[in-house]
Image: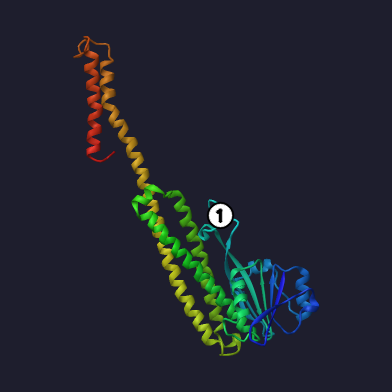
């Protein structure tokens, strides 16, 4: 899929209909390729003499070659975007975003002097949000310069990561209430399910941290004098870098909170298991004295007291009941049962 955009006179971005390579005019400032076919890649090559990487090469690219400027002055950037896999849901709840697995997708940016090429494997929320804002020119940028499009997409990525961390924070507050309030824990909380939910949150936080650190490396590279060739972008890059730093710290805080809740939930599970084992260990202690008396009076001997007579059965039964009820009273007094 190939989508192209041009800058309007009022400073916004508008999409152009692309039916073939002949539609790729020089006025286009941004070409967005989503899982492109070989034909679409050939259109770009014919129109702009620009080779595009394959989707497989984006995943296999080494970290040392993720950001560079080639001999022709073309800027190449490969960075991670976080997306949610809606095909996996817990209990079929499509509204709980935290119940979806997070996936990291590599997006390639190729920045010419006159246009920006982006390439990705599937649609992303950050790109859709940026396009909506760019149509309204909410960023108040000159989109005739493709560098501003690049910075706008990175800002949209940062906004999405901030929203994800905010959603995780809200979920963790709810989980804290469920885990730490005893009356709620006994009433509605499935501890095994809570472990699964917290593990999913920890996985998403780890991938969000990966994307944030990768974005910080991208911004560090763009802040170098030779990267963009101009200082007009320095203020925006510094502002994005500060936002990244604050989100990395927030992610670390949420990571600690998840670990605390995981340890607390695991402690509750161990406590419940210990209570179950204790109850099973108390039961033999309650039955041992009555069984001992019953086995003694079951012996074939005449010397035992209350071994004969019409009332001997009831007397022995009362003794057995006394030895059975006595430990129950003692254990309840000790609050062991």
Vertical side of 190 occupied by 133: above or below: below
Against 284, residue 170 (above or below) is below
Percent coordinates x, y for residue 30 in the rendering = 68, 79
Could you tell me how many numbered marks the image carries?
Answer: 1
Count residues near mark 1 (Cα–Cα under 10 Å), then give few for <14, some for 14-19, many for 20+. some
The residue depicted at 54 percent of the width and 75 percent of the height is 215
Q: Which secondary structure lies at badge 1?
A: loop
The image's colour scheme reads rainbow
Seen in the picture, residue 24 relative to 276 is either above or below; the reply is below
Residue 324 in the figure: left or right of residue 36: left
Q: Is residue 326 left or right of residue 79?
A: left
Residue 3 placement, left or right of 20: left
Camera-side residue: 310 or 260? Answer: 310
Where's the C terminus, which quadrant?
top left
On the picture, is 146 further left or further right than 290? right
The picture places residue 272, in percent across and down from the top left corner, at 36, 45
Q: Is residue 82 above or below residue 226?
A: above
Residue to which mark 1 is pinned: 89
Q: Residue at x 37, y 47 (%)?
A: 186
Q: Depth check: 337 or 270 in front?
A: 337
Quarter where residue 153 is shown: bottom right
Residue 226, position as x, y percentages in the image: 59, 87
Which quadrant of the rendered structure holds the N terminus? bottom right
Residue at point 59% right, 77% down? 133
Rendered location of residue 53, percent (x, y): 70, 72
């Amino acid at each position: 899929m190939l989508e192209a955009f041009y800058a309007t006179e009022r400073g916004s971005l508008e999409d152009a209909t692309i039916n073939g390579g002949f539609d790729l005019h020089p006025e286009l400032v941004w070409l967005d390729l989503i899982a492109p076919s070989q034909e679409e890649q050939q259109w770009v090559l014919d129109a702009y003499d620009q080779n595009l990487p394959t989707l497989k090469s984006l995943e296999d690219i080494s970290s040392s070659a993720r950001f560079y400027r080639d001999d022709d002055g073309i800027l190449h950037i490969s960075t991670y975007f976080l997306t949610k896999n809606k095909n996996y849901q817990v209990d079929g709840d499509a509204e709980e975003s935290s119940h979806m697995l997070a996936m990291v997708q590599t997006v390639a940016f190729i920045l010419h002097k006159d246009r920006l090429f982006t390439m990705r494997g599937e649609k992303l929320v950050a790109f859709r949000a940026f396009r909506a804002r760019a149509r309204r020119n909410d960023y108040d940028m000159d989109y005739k310069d493709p560098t501003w499009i690049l910075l706008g997409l990175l800002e949209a990525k940062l906004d999405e990561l901030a929203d994800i961390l905010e959603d995780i924070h809200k979920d963790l507050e709810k989980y804290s209430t469920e885990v730490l309030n005893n009356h709620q824990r006994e009433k509605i909380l499935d501890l095994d399910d809570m472990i699964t939910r917290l593990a999913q949150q920890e996985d998403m936080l780890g991938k969000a941290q990966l994307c944030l650190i990768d974005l910080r490396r991208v911004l560090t590279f763009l802040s170098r004098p030779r990267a963009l060739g101009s200082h007009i972008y320095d203020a925006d890059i510094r502002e994005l870098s500060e936002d990244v730093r604050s989100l990395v710290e927030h992610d670390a805080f949420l990571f600690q909170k998840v670990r605390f809740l995981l340890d607390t939930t695991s402690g509750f599970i161990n406590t419940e298991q210990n209570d179950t084992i204790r109850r099973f260990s108390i039961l033999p202690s309650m039955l041992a004295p009555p069984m001992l008396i019953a086995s003694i009076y079951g012996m074939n001997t005449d010397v035992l007291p209350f071994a004969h007579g019409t009332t001997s059965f009831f007397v022995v039964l009362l003794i057995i009941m006394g030895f059975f009820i006595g430990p129950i009273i003692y254990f309840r007094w000790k609050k062991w049962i």
